[in-house]
Every structure is written in structure tokens, then in C-alpha cells.
Image (cartoon, helix red, strand yellow):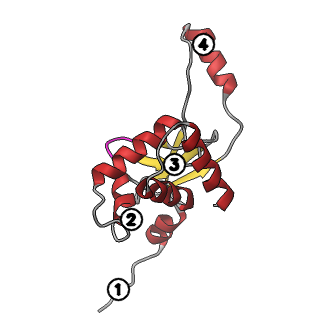
Amino acid sequence: MSEQQLEEAIDTLKESGVRITPQRHAVLDFLLNSKGHPTADEIYKALEGKFPNMSVATVYNNLRVLKEIGLVRELTYGDSSSRFDCDTTEHYHIICEDCGKIVDFYYPTLDEVESLAEQVTGFEVSHHRMELYGTCPDCKELTDTPEKNVQ
């Protein structure tokens, strides 16, 4: 993550009239530097040492504000906790069914599918999302490695 991305995100907050509290800044900075798609609890645990008085509710409130302004996307998959993504460009996700890791992948948007869906169903499509599921390389390696018999 570049310093420029953080500055642009802070400018967006200012333009939206949102106060930039130290906690909000820290949540945003953490998300921008995150390689994964953390849950609110993971963000809280990562920041609690720096902000001992911050609660999980504070993290959720900040994520809600960042989501409302369009700086963060909330990802919900099945029954698991919501995950948060600072990459708001059009992209898709592949999810490991074993460990739950989520990886971004980019592919031209499926605008044709939306158009076809509208024509076939009469719906007005607002958006779409695509998820792929499988086994990540780390989990695959674990299942492919024969266990050694220790006697």
C-alpha cells in the first residue's frame, strides 16, 4: 500500500465530512496494508495493543462509516463472519474451503451476464458478485503429503 492511497482515503473522509479519529485512521491504515480480508475481530485484535480503550463496537462503527463512504467493501460468505476489503475495484474472490483464506483475482467484469439476465428475467440488475471455491496451495500440500508413520 502506498502512502498516496492512505492520503487519498483520508481526503475522501474529509470530503465526506467524517472526522478522522486516531482509531478510524488506524482501522483504515490496517485495512489498506492488509494482504487478506480481515474480520472486524481480527482488526480489533491487531489494534488493541495500540488502542487499549478501543472496543470491538468501535471497530464495527468505523467499518460501517468506511463502508458507507465507499472506502471498504463488506464480504459475507455463508455463516462465517463478515470480512472487509479495501480494494473497491471490480474483482472477484476465490475461497479455500479448508482454511477460509480469500484471494482476489481480476477478470473483465461480467457486464454481458448482467445484460443477459435483465433481458431474460425482466429484472433491473444492480450488481453481481462471483465466488469460486476450492483448496488453496497450502492446504492442498497438507492433504497431498503422505503422513509419515512414526513407530
Q: Quadrant of residue 47?
A: bottom left
Q: Is residue 75 visible?
A: no
Label 2 vs label 4, nearer the camera: 2
Q: Which residue is mark 1?
A: 149
State the CA–CA distance, disc 2 to disc 3: 17 Å
Above or below residue 124? Residue 58 is below
Q: What number is the disc on residue 118?
A: 4
Q: Is residue 48 visible?
A: yes
Residue 57 horizontal side relative to residue 134, left or right: left
Where the C terminus falls, by quadrant?
bottom left
State the CA–CA distance, disc 1 to disc 2: 42 Å
Label 2 vs label 3, nearer the camera: 2
Q: Secondary structure at mark 4?
A: helix
Q: Quadrant of residue 117?
A: top right
Q: Which residues are magenta?
A: 77-82
Q: Say few, some or many: other residues with alpha carbon within 10 Å of mark 1 (under 14 / 14 to 19 / 20 or more).
A: few
Label 4 vs label 1, nearer the camera: 4
Q: Say few, some or many: other residues with alpha carbon within 10 Å of mark 2 (under 14 / 14 to 19 / 20 or more).
A: some
State the CA–CA distance, disc 4 to disc 3: 28 Å
Residue 42 horizontal side relative to residue 125, left or right: left
* Three-letter residue code for mark 1: Asn
Q: Position of residue 81 (x, y in %)?
A: 34, 48
Q: Is residue 79 magenta?
A: yes
Above or below residue 68? Residue 27 is below
Q: Which residue is mark 3?
A: 85
Q: Are marks 1 and 2 in contact (CB under 8 Å)?
A: no
Residue at image position (42%, 48%) is 83
